[in-house]
Image (cartoon, rainbow, N blue to C red):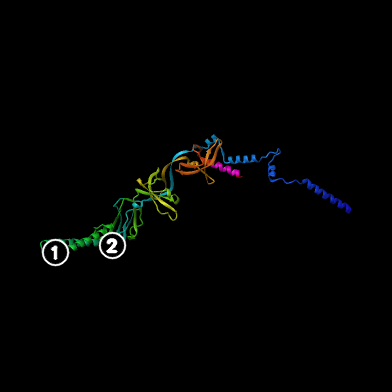
Amino acid sequence: MTRKQTRLIALMCAIAAVLAALMLWRPPAAPGAQGHAAHEDSHGHDDRHEEAAAGKSEAGQEDAIAMTDAQVKANGIAIDSAGPATIQERLHLPAQVKVDAERTVALAAPAGGIVESVPVSVGTAVRKGQPLVVIRSPAVAQWRAEYGGAQQRLALARTAYRREKTLWEERISARQDLDAAQAAFREAELDARAAGERLAALGIAAGGGVSSSVTLRAPLAGVVLDKPVVAGQAVDESRALLTIADLSQVWVEAAVPAESLSQVGAGMRARVSVNAAPKQLEGTLSFVGPVLGEATRMATARVTLPNPGLRLRPGMLATVDLLGQPASVPVTVASDAVQTIHERSVVFVRTAAGFRPASVTVGRSDGTRTEILAGLAPGARYAAGNSFLLKADLGKSEAEHDD
């Protein structure tokens, strides 16, 4: 092949490439026109509005739950209508049965000594005045001796005073002798009284001569809760020997969160539930603690209850429902109907095809009825019972949609 032929072939290829480029080239369309053309079908119709309408329709129906009347009945879903009701707010609190501290006594030794006997044990029911602990104490013997000596001095001073008074009346002795005898008598009287008061304050019987034995008796009827001592043990006045409590009345103390304290006040009606009691116990809130616990950040609310038969035992767990003032509310639903979905309160409203979730704003509740502030019209029919089944179906549908 000659050089002339090679140049001719190259020129023909270049011309063919230019012609191909001219055939494939089209002028650019305007943005609006291009978008419009993209949605035109073969007949020149724009389908964008139809797609938007379809999307809106799907969005409105994607949360709906299709369910026939027969399926509603088979699933046990109760249907009710939103309407007015009287709501009494209820605050449900954990609680515990405790000993009434005002009916509890800790017995201590009047002085250092040795425990001679303890005829009772933990759990023993005791009557008022019953012997509980016998102690031998040298100090007790000394106090009795001092009391006995004071009584003797008082008797002598009384005799001397009466004699001097007789002598003065017969004009035998001087007035100053009578005055001195009277002063001595008054002083001896005070000493004897002080010695007797000391024994009485410590629960020590004045009789018995100089005996070192002292018997501690129950100051009230109750039950022995604690007995940390045994016979033969050395004790002193700083240590409790027995703890006795009258359990015919107990405290039920509930823990109140700080954010709920504004709803709580002394005098509120309270219902106490304890496993030992066959039914709820009625009471009144008698005390609300002014200080929050350092660890729990909660305040103590106390209900005082009678305890016939001693069925309520300290340490038992309980629950306390504090009841507020009743209030008439225009729109309410059954409390079980309100479900939480994606941090929203939802009520499932009955439709012709099934149910749809309606977002609502809830207000007061007494555990049975819940106030609806917004999102549900009076008379609206809704799923009142077993609505959790609808929540589960809705969650399943959302999961399938995400897949």
Q: Quadrant of residue 136?
A: bottom left
Kindly indicate the quadrant of the structure image that contains residue 52.
top right
* Alpha-carbon span between mark 1 and mark 2: 42 Å
**What is the span of residues highlighted in magenta in the rendered image?**
391-401
User: Picture quarter containing residue 391?
Assistant: top right
Looking at numbered disc 1 in the image, what kind of residue is underneath it? Arg
Near-viewer residue (43 or 153)? 43
1 and 2 marks in contact (CB < 8 Å): no
At 62% from the left and 40% from the top, the residue drawn is 53
Q: Position of residue 105 (x, y in %)?
A: 33, 54
- Which marked residue is nearer to the observer: mark 1 or mark 2? 1
Tell me the number on the disc at residue 43.
Answer: none
Viewer-side residue, 70 vs 325: 325
Confirm whether the magenta stretch covers residue 400.
Answer: yes
* 20 on left or right of 231: right
Residue 5, position in %: x, y? 88, 51
- Can residue 94 be seen by looking at this rendering? no
Residue 175 image label: 1
Residue positioned 78% across, 45% down in the render = 23
Quarter containing the C terminus: top right
Q: Amino acid at mark 2?
A: Ala
Q: Secondary structure at mark 2?
A: helix
SS label for mark 1: helix
Q: Which mark is residue 139?
A: 2
Reply yes or no: does residue 176 show up in magenta. Answer: no
- What kind of secondary structure does the magenta stretch mostly adopt? helix
Q: Nearer the viewer, residue 24 or 91?
A: 24
Number of numbered tags placed on the structure image: 2
Q: Is residue 106 left or right of residue 363?
A: left
Name above or below for residue 207 compared with residue 20. Answer: below
Residue 275, horizontal then vertical, whole percent: 41, 45
